Amino acid sequence: MKEYQPKADCLVGKTILITGAGDGIGKTLALKCAEYGATVILLGKTVKKLEEVYDLIEQLGKQQASILPVDLQGATESHYADLADTIKREYGKLDALVHNAGQLGVLGPFGQIEKSTWDEVLQVNLTSQFMLTKALLPVLSLAENASTIFTTSGVGNQGRAYWGAYSVSKFATEGMMQTLADEYENSTQRFNAINPGATRTKMRASAFPAEDVSLLKGAEDIMPTYLYLLSDDSLEVNGQRLNAQ
Ligand code: NAP
């Protein structure tokens, strides 16, 4: 799907929620979705970053975006229920949900993982996705076809020393995706995961501070796989793990 060539109007009429839309891959994806015609709901922690993305979308002259400030660390089921009600009221349906926000935690020996770090990483990378998906399933079911994308990693199906809680959170993310894909097999909803591969962002820099970033792909380079799963060209694709590189 790295070679996928999206049609200019492939996301027209679609409302797409992206978590972690203020920075890194999520920011690039939000702008790309707007460029291809979607109405984008920008969810993230830092309002200032979300406002910047909102303004960039305004400058594109595309569908107006909206901002949902949510700290996935602290949000509760009732926050997600309110959020789902708001989306249903404002847009009538949700065509796509992209679970992109993530936290690396602290890389290091398993025996030294702090319980607090474990809890934080699992809360942001896993439990919040469970609560957000659960709240939004009814709103996704109102779309003609709905695509939910989870974000995995190279350590999401192959464990690696020192990647502790982050790796475990991505394995579980893939498990959640597969469970939902099987459960909704005969429905209008599909669930898949993308492994972005090494991509030049702040998270990558904190995991590999010494590497030569000029050798890395930028977020722009991995967009075709996202656009493919968001567009109706992937209606038959369900339960898959796609590598964006
Ligand atoms: P990034 O640049 O660090 O961006 C992470 C995003 O997640 C930010 O927008 C951040 O918002 C948001 N976020 C973090 N904690 C949050 C919280 N508690 N509540 C709400 N939002 C929160 O990382 P990235 O590289 O773009 O990563 C995006 C996804 O790709 C992640 O799931 C990551 O695991 C995955 N991934 C990345 C790579 C890579 O090489 N970059 C490789 C494999 C997988 P704030 O800025 O407001 O904190």
Image (cartoon, rainbow, N blue to C red):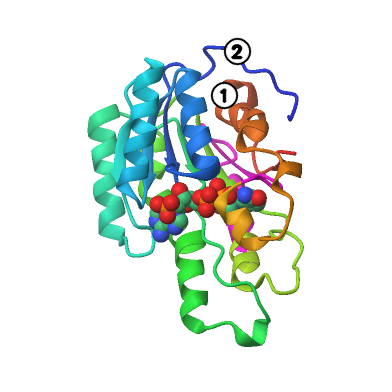
Residue 129 in the figure: left or right of residue 159: left
Instruction: Let me know if residue 119 is in the magenta part.
Output: no
Instruction: Let me know if residue 191 is in the magenta part.
Output: yes
Residue name at image x 37 percent, y 38 percent: 42
Depth check: give the residue in front, 7 or 20: 20
Which stretch did the figure color magenta?
172-200
* Labelled pair 2, 1 in contact (Cβ < 8 Å): yes
Q: Which residue is mark 2?
A: 7
Bin the neighbour count of mark 1 within 10 Å (Cα to Cα): few under 14, some 14-19, many 20 and up.
many
Q: CA distance from mark 2 to mark 1?
A: 9 Å
Residue 179 is at least partly visible in this image: no
Pinpoint residue 36: horizontal percent, then vertical percent.
50, 18
In the displayed structure, would residue 178 be above or below residue 91?
below
Depth check: give the residue in front, 68 or 202: 202
Bin the neighbour count of mark 2 within 10 Å (Cα to Cα): few under 14, some 14-19, many 20 and up.
few
Q: Earlier in the sequence, mark 2 or mark 1?
A: 2
- Amino acid type of the residue that numbered disc 1 sits on in the rendered structure: Ser
Q: Which residue is mark 1?
A: 231
Which residue is the extreme one toward the top? 8
- Amino acid type of the residue that numbered disc 2 sits on in the rendered structure: Lys
Q: Quadrant of residue 225?
A: top right
In the displayed structure, would residue 195 be above or below residue 164?
above
Q: Quadrant of the C terminus?
A: top right
Picture disc at residue 73: none
Q: Secondary structure at mark 2?
A: loop
Residue name at image x 52 percent, y 34 percent: 28
Pinpoint residue 8: horizontal percent, then vertical percent.
55, 12
